[in-house]
Image (cartoon, rainbow, N blue to C red):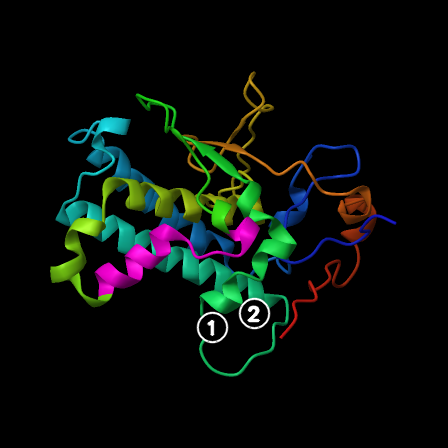
Amino acid sequence: MSIVRPYRRTVRQRVHGEYGLSDYVKHPLFAKDPAHYVRAYLLIEQDLKRLFDYIEPSDQNLPCYSYRIHELLLRACIEVEANCKAILLENGYAKSGDLRMVDYVKIEASHRLSEYRVRVPVWTGANGVRRPFSNWASRTPLNWYKTYNAAKHDRHSEFQSATFEMMLDAICGCLVVLSAQFMEEEFAGGMDIVISGGLTDGWDYAIGRFFHVDYPKSWAETERYAFKWKELSSQVDPFDNYPYPP
């Protein structure tokens, strides 16, 4: 049997195979203050596009490093942590003490972040499609997150490891976590942002309309959403908590 009530902060493939309309993500009980998280990402994206004025987005420049790159890496990873924490806590995750990556990796089961792909539309070379959470498919650490921790705690020694590539994967990782919660919805001052379908090559526009995103399509039918939102939306609380293990 398919899922008849959506999980909080979780978008998922529908029974017909697509992701469909995302009206349910705008319900006040789906996520607490979602615009707070989207706005933080959009500022990072703006700064990334400014950086592209000076560092060409290409394979050749992946090893580059600088203070601006270091700054964006840290900001993006902080946002990944903030979003992962919100997903877990708003779904009733019960654990005392601070949450860490050993907790955040549990989101792989509910969102399949490892399957998301992000395409940089102005890239030169073969590495313009990023899968920032691919390591989670085998429950191995994320290289860009390890770099973030190293560069945060010992910038002098680890400064050169905070490369353009690590920064780009961190920003794409932030976008993936947001897309897995809200699809393309930006919560822009109460205005509905309508995107008329995806791109012609099977990709979809992402939040900010700069990157392109490819959503997981491998959910079993029993794991897909089969709810009728018009019927659910009249309920006091139309959402379920995902049962994350402690």
Which of labels 1 and 2 is toward the front?
A: 1
- The first of marks 1 and 2 along the sequence is 2
83 lies left or right of 230: left
Q: Identify residue type, mark 1.
A: Leu
User: How many numbered discs sit on the rendered protein?
Assistant: 2
Q: Can residue 241 be seen in this view?
A: yes
Which class describes the residues within 10 Å of circle 1: few (<14), some (14-19), or many (20+)?
A: some
Main secondary structure of the magenta stretch:
helix
> Residue 211, located in which quarter of the rendered image?
top left
- Relative to 94, is 2 above or below? above
Question: Which residue is outermost to the left?
Answer: 156
Q: Which numbered marker is on residue 89? A: 2
- Range covered by the magenta-colored residues: 136-152
For the residue labelled by badge 2, is the local secondary structure a helix, a strand or a loop? helix
Q: Which residue does the image show at 43% across and 62% down from the upper left?
A: 82
Residue drawn at point x = 69 percent, y = 57 percent: 7
Q: Nearer the viewer, residue 137 or 215?
A: 137
214 vs 242, left or right, is: left
Residue at the spot of label 1: 99
Q: In which quarter of the image is residue 238?
A: bottom right
24 drawn magenta: no
Residues under numbered marks 1 and 2 in contact, where contact means CB atoms less than 8 Å apart: yes
Tell whether position 145 is magenta: yes
Q: What element carries label 1?
A: loop
Q: Residue 222 location, x and y as percent?
A: 82, 47
Question: As drawn, is 52 to the left or to the right of 5?
Answer: left
Residue 131 percent across, percent down from the top left: 46, 39
Measuring 79% from the left and 54% from the top, which residue is drawn there? 234
Q: Mark 2: which amino acid?
A: Leu
